[in-house]
Amino acid sequence: MDLRNNSLDRFMSTDQNSIEQFLSGFRQTIETGALRLRDIPEDQSQMNKREDKWSPKEIIGHLIDSASNNHQRFVRAQLGSALVFQRYEQVEWVMKQRYNEEPWDQLIQLWKHYNLHLAHLISVIPEQTLTQLRPLHNLDRIAFETVDKDQTTTLEYFVRDYVAHLKHHLAQILGDNEIDSAKSSPEPQY
């Protein structure tokens, strides 16, 4: 993938206020998403449309797992120059935690508050750290919108990629075309 003409340009900031605007949009997505998720009744939240797809509870569980893993990645990225992180087995994590057995409102609250914390974390990362070029990374294997191993990337790209992944899965649950969901995911979907 030639990132100069593709997703890197889409995710990189172009002005001083860009990261603040991005974070404002992220917080709005979290707040609005949580309100809309609460409109889904408990019984419907655990129903898959097809056997090979996740239920809304399982998708939100997956997003909680993603928040947990990326929380550590965003902190660790500030402690070194590489963006190389351990992968996690997404399908197995969802299966082992049996999210369909947890109360829907509890999952929504955990998802909401964890992501609000991530928005805070991102807001306090120095701009120099966010935009530092990182030639050593494994975003070719762990990012939602992958980056070729030969391409340089940034923590800002990875942060924005996290939010694109979150919006993709919210769109699966809410059936929203307004939420950016251009990429299909390899894991089971609702």
Image (cartoon, rainbow, N blue to C red):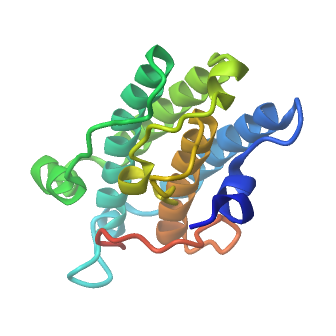
Q: Is residue 135 above or below residue 6?
A: above
Image location (x, y in percent) of residue 4:
71, 58
Residue 99 lies left or right of residue 138; in this view the side is left
Return the x and y of residue 190 as percentages of the image width and height: 36, 73
Position in image of residue 6 (x %, y %): 69, 65
Is residue 161 visible in the rendered image? The answer is yes
Residue 27 appears left or right of 84:
right
Image point 72% across, 22% down: which residue?
127
Is residue 108 or residue 64 the one in the foreground?
64
Question: Going by the picture, which residue comes out furthest to the left?
Answer: 96
| Residue sitting at the far front | 150
Is 96 left or right of 68, judged from the image as shown? left
Rendered position, 176 above or below 162: below
* Extreme residue toward the bottom, this view: 50
Instruction: Determine the residue positioned at 73% across, 56% down.
Output: 10
Q: Quadrant of residue 90?
A: bottom left
Rendered image quadrant of residue 49: bottom left
* Residue at 14 percent of width and 55 percent of height: 92
Q: Residue 42 in the image: x percent, y percent?
A: 34, 60
Residue occupying the point 67% across, 54% down = 8
Total number of numbered labels? 0
Q: Quadrant of the N terminus?
A: bottom right
Question: Would you say residue 34 is visible in this rendering?
Answer: no
Q: Nearer the viewer, residue 73 or 92?
A: 73
Q: Up-down: is 170 above or below 189? A: above
Q: Is residue 4 left or right of residue 75?
A: right
